């Protein structure tokens, strides 16, 4: 376990005098955080640079809690543990900022994923359609891919050139825990990727990462933070008033597929969810589709 987490747990016991059961709950919550960091970013949880654990990464962690279908009570406890741990790190001088300051615990009811409307997705994609610079070609391809495949932000930044199959219009994705899945991608997104590889990528940086498909201006693999910031700029330019995150495009992908008639099992496979219960969080947005399936399947309907 990360030495800073160990120090925090010792602080809870020795200085704050919390009970063994309470400390055990903190330990389990922070062990889950370590596992998330390892599975999502391939980082060693023993050597995390907590000063770089910023707001986009925290938002991604909270989105992961949503996807796992935790109750609001459990999610609130995990968020409280994270906030206490981050405050401890700042007080100890390990970090210089407090990225959890705007993080709020959920209130009653099940967590509801936030999605964009079809019009908002259209506005976002239309805004990037007239790419003219290498960065614009990249951003167009990234946003098309986020929505086309329902990918996590960490999965997009980790895509390598050899993961893309233009013959079958699919992309090989390595999700959490390096679990592999093959995702179909619609033609417009594949065209955007092809344009980026032909026109945009060759001009990004003098010395380029030979494997990564999506590069920053220096030729290195784009980071989650960099992608997050670009998406916010594009959303602002497209006139979308919502506080947009990359994960919202994943939610939109799932919700729009279900409303379009896709089966829950199919969407589960595309998202890379282990348990279909996790995918069911989207059904609150798809009442029309659920009714159609009910009418088609129930013998008395």
Image: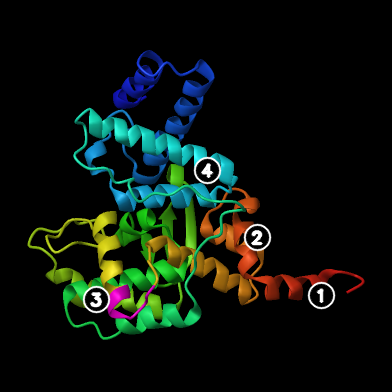
Q: Residues within 10 Å of mark 2 (few under 14, many from 20)?
A: some
Q: Which residues are magenta?
A: 235-241
Q: Residues within 10 Å of mark 3 (few under 14, many from 20)?
A: many
Query: Which of disc 2 and disc 3 is earlier in sequence?
Result: 3
The residue where tag 3 is placed is: 137
Q: Percent from the top left, x then y, of residue 24?
A: 50, 22
**Residue at position x 33%, y 80% in the image:** 239
What distance separates the C-alpha of mark 4 from that of mark 1?
A: 35 Å
The residue where tag 4 is placed is: 75
Q: Residue 265 got which mark? A: 2
What distance separates the C-alpha of mark 3 from that of mark 4?
A: 38 Å
Question: Would you identify the image quadrant in which residue 35 lies?
Answer: top left
Image quarter where the N terminus lies is top left
Query: Which of disc 4 and disc 3 is earlier in sequence?
Result: 4
Question: Would you identify the image quadrant in which residue 293 lies?
Answer: bottom right
Labels 1 & 3 near each other (Cβ < 8 A): no
Query: Which of disc 2 and disc 1 is earlier in sequence?
Result: 2
Q: Residue 295 got which mark? A: 1
Residue 238 forms part of the magenta stretch: yes
- The answer to whether 278 is drawn above or below residue 98 in the figure is below
Q: Residues within 10 Å of mark 1 (few under 14, many from 20)?
A: few
Circle 1 SS class: helix
What distance separates the C-alpha of mark 3 from that of mark 2?
A: 33 Å
What distance separates the C-alpha of mark 4 from that of mark 2?
A: 25 Å
């Amino acid at each position: 376990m990360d030495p800073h987490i160990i120090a925090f747990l010792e602080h809870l016991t020795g200085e704050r005098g919390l009970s063994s059961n309470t400390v055990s709950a903190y330990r389990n919550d922070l062990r889950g955080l370590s596992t998330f960091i390892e599975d999502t970013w391939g980082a060693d949880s023993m050597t995390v640079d907590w000063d770089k654990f910023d707001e986009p990464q925290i938002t991604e962690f909270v989105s992961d809690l949503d996807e796992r279908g935790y109750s609001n009570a459990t999610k609130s406890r995990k968020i409280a543990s994270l906030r206490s741990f981050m405050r401890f790190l700042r007080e100890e001088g390990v970090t210089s900022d407090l990225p959890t300051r705007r993080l709020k615990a959920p209130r009653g009811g099940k967590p509801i994923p936030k999605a964009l409307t079809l019009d908002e997705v259209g506005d976002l994609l239309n805004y990037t359609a007239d790419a003219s610079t290498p960065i614009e070609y990249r951003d167009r391809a990234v946003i098309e891919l986020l929505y086309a495949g329902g990918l996590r932000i960490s999965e997009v930044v980790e895509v390598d050139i050899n993961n893309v199959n233009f013959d079958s219009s699919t992309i090989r994705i390595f999700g959490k825990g390096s679990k592999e899945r093959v995702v179909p991608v619609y033609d417009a997104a594949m065209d955007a990727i092809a344009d980026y590889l032909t026109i945009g990528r060759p001009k990004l940086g003098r010395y380029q990462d030979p494997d990564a498909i999506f590069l920053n201006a220096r030729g290195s693999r784009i980071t989650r933070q960099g992608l997050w910031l670009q998406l916010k700029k594009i959303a602002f330019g497209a006139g979308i008033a919502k506080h947009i995150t990359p994960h919202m495009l994943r939610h939109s992908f799932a919700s729009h597929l279900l409303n379009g008639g896709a089966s829950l099992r199919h969407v589960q496979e595309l998202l890379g969810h282990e348990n279909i219960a996790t995918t069911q969080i989207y059904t609150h947005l798809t009442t029309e589709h659920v009714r159609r399936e009910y009418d088609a399947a129930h013998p008395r309907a």
